[in-house]
Image (spheres, helix red, strand yellow):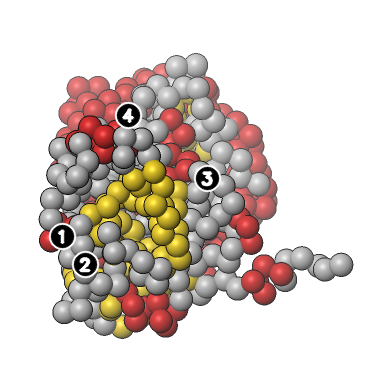
Amino acid sequence: MRAHPAGPLHADVVADHASVARPTSADELNRLSPAVWPTGAHRNADGALEIGGVDVRDAVTAYGSPLFLFDEDDLRSRARRYRTAYVDAGARLVYYAAKAFLSTTVARWVTEEGLGIDVASGGELAVALRAGVPGDRLLMHGNNKSMAEIEAAVAAGVGRIVIDSYEDIVRIADAAGRAGVVQPVLVRVTLGVEAHTHEFIATAHEDQKFGLSVASGAAEEAVRRIAKLPSLDLMGLHSHIGSQIFDAAGFQVAAARVVTVAQRIWDQQGIEIEELNLGGGMGIAYLESDDPLDVPDMALQIGDIVGKECGAAGIPMPALAFEPGRAIVGPAAVTVYEVGTVKPVDLDRGAVRAYVSVDGGMSDNIRTALYDAEYTVTLASRASSADPVLCRVVGKHCESGDIVVRDAWLPADISPGDLLAVAATGAYCRSMASNYNYLPRPAVVSARAGELAVVLRRETIDDLLQLDPGA
Ligand code: LLP
């Protein structure tokens, strides 16, 4: 959404440089839209941002900057609400997709809220187990699970392992056979559905690495092979069409197509598909103008479609399962940064952009560089009555693509020492963080009722030096 900016510059000059409209007043600049900020985020009497009853200045004094700050109540209530919605729509279990963000604290919170956990590596499995999550509440993914990861999953009694290749079938059957157990599995199928999202995060079209293709017959061949192996128990099918999806059509088509596959397996092999796991992918708002799908409504629509299609196909309605990640944790956290430098740069036709450098960057949020992701940022340590200036919030790394927020309007008096907060960074920021330029990864803390708790402590340079055996 673009509007005509007010102010000294001609509208089209600024519009050429900004993807977001210029706020028309200081009030608008200071406003925290509930569409992107955690529930209950507000400015206190000092004008500073408060999350979970904690002033972000106090959080930074206690734990340093940059800082990921989770609103525990926001995360828990979202987990609870979405779980209920999916269960009402026919889900047997809703798995939180741990790749979005994982720590023992968050594993415990989502488990307490009745969710299972989808893990995608031995590392994620180890965290979930350390948090005390029962094996039967876990599901393991991976297009190249190692034998050690498979053995660890089987030993933990993981409730579902999702088969993603013919090699998986042999390896999981072997591990389960050696352990003397029968391992429940799902077959991940690719349905040829193009989700309308960034190419790198769309996963159910044919030309990509995940799943077994329905069009080529690989998915049905996998079912045939699994049925012959006594150490495997085929529970059903899995489909995940992509991530950050705003368009209901992709989910609807996938739900209908996967039922057709289930029907063919029933007709041709006499095998009942008891469970359909339809993955995650529900998008969230990063900008106020984003218009994400309503999760409960979407869940009901999917349940309805599967019910109708099964009725028409003459097969029993399978239990459903879902794997939301971003929709649960994404909106629940913000990243707080400290401003270090402010550099006005002349653009064309008299326009100026201020490059506002913060003390993190692409090492704690790679999404802007990787997907052209857009974010909402606000001055968090105070409110300001200054006019808005066009800014780009950049990190401290040695490359010009190190951008946190490409286009942002911040008050003209933005200065070194100010704190900025970027909204909706709970998913795929800390979990995709790196140590580029030997930056230690930020701490993650949670706030609730005015109290802070450490979720992940800040890395130190000593932590990083310890990896190096030395000269
Ligand atoms: N299930 C499967 C099999 C997945 O591959 C994913 C995400 C999910 C569930 C959870 O999707 P969600 O509900 O969070 O959209 N790094 C990217 C997203 C990659 C998603 C990978 N798979 C990003 O930052 O946008």
Earlier-in-chain disc, 1 versus 3: 1
Q: Is residue 210 above or below residue 151?
A: above
Residue 255, horizontal then vertical, whole percent: 28, 30
Labels 2 and 1 touching (C-beta < 8 A): yes
Disc sitting over residue 26 in the figure = 1
Q: Nearer the viewer, mark 4 or mark 2?
A: 2
Assign a secondary structure to mark 2. Answer: loop
Labels 4 and 3 touching (C-beta < 8 A): no
> In screen coordinates, is 67 left or right of 246?
right
Q: Work out how far the residue at label 3 is from the one at label 2, CA to CA, in angstroms.
A: 29 Å
Residue 276, horizontal then vertical, whole percent: 34, 38
Residue drawn at the location 30% of the way across and 49% of the way down: 390
Q: Work out how far the residue at label 4 is from the one at label 1, CA to CA, in angstroms.
A: 36 Å
Disc 4 crowd rating (10 Å Cα; few below 14, some 14-19, many 20+) is some
Disc sitting over residue 232 in the figure = none
Residue 350, horizontal then vertical, whole percent: 31, 40
Q: Work out how far the residue at label 4 is from the one at label 3, CA to CA, in angstroms.
A: 28 Å
Earlier-in-chain disc, 4 versus 3: 4
Residue marked by disc 3: 400
Residue marked by disc 2: 384
Labels 1 and 3 touching (C-beta < 8 A): no
Residue drawn at the location 37% of the way across and 58% of the way down: 426
Question: Looking at numbered disc 2 in the image, what kind of residue is underneath it?
Answer: Ser
Residue marked by disc 4: 196
